[in-house]
Image (cartoon, grey):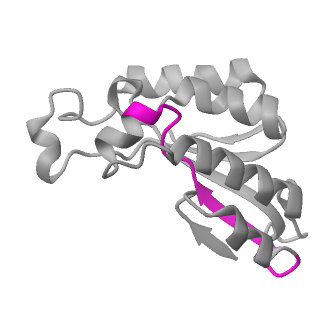
Amino acid sequence: MYNCGGYEPFDVLALLDGIVDIYLADFKYTDPTMAETYSCGARDYPEVAAAAVAEMHRQVGDLTTGENGVALRGLMIRHLVLPNNIAGTDQFVRFVAEKLARSTFVNLMSQYRPEHEAFQRPELCHQVTRQEYARAVNWAREAGLANAGFET
C-alpha cells in the first residue's frame, strides 16, 4: 500500500508501476490559487495531483476487495471537504467521474477543524457545517460516483 498526499511526481509513480497494489491518495484542491494560498505556494498541486491519481488509476484500476472485505488492489482517493468549498469538492467529484471512472472509490471526509493560523482566516475558521457537507455529498451523487464513502 502506498499512502500519499497526492502531490506525487510522475517519474516516481512510473518507478512504482507493478510494485504497488493499493494506492491511498489525497486530493486536496482543484484550484491552483487555493493550493497556493493554503499549501505553501504549491500552485501546481491540482495539476500534479490530477496527473498522479490518473497514473495510479491506470496502474491498479478500481479498488477490489476479497471475500472478507479487505482491499486487494486498486485506488482509493481521500478528499477533505473544507469550509466555503475551498477544496473545490464540486470540481473534484466531476474530475473523478469524467477523467477516472464513476466506480473509483472516494472518501469524502468531513472532519476538518480549524487549528493554528486557520483562526486568522475567516473563510477557514469554522468546522465544515452539516449543510456544506450535505452539499458535497449531493455533488458526488450528481456526478454519479458509485463508490463514494460518506460520513454520517
**Residue 71 place in picture, x, y as percent:** 79, 69
**Which is more toward the observer, 103 or 98?**
98
Q: Quadrant of the N terminus?
A: bottom right
**Which is more toward the observer, 78 or 69?**
78
Q: Residue furthest left?
A: 120
Say whether residue 22 is magenta.
yes
**Which is more toward the observer, 55 or 120?**
55
The structure residue drawn at horizontal position 17% and vertical position 43%, both measured from the top left corner, is: 118
Rendered image quadrant of residue 102: top right
**Residue 112 place in picture, x, y as percent:** 34, 45
**Left or right: 129, with 56 as reference point:** left
**Left or right: 100, with 96 as reference point:** right
The structure residue drawn at horizontal position 38% and vertical position 30%, both measured from the top left corner, is: 86
Count of picture labels: 0
In this rendering, the answer to whether 96 lies above or below 85 is: below
Rendered image quadrant of residue 50: top right
In this rendering, the answer to whether 8 lies above or below 114 is: below
**Left or right: 36, with 11 as reference point:** left
| Magenta part of the chain | 18-33
**Which is more toward the observer, 83 or 68?**
83
**Left or right: 74, with 77 as reference point:** right
**Residue 66 place in picture, x, y as percent:** 89, 70
In this rendering, the answer to whether 133 lies above or below 14 is: above
The structure residue drawn at horizontal position 50% and vertical position 19%, both measured from the top left corner, is: 135
**Residue 145 place in picture, x, y as percent:** 76, 32
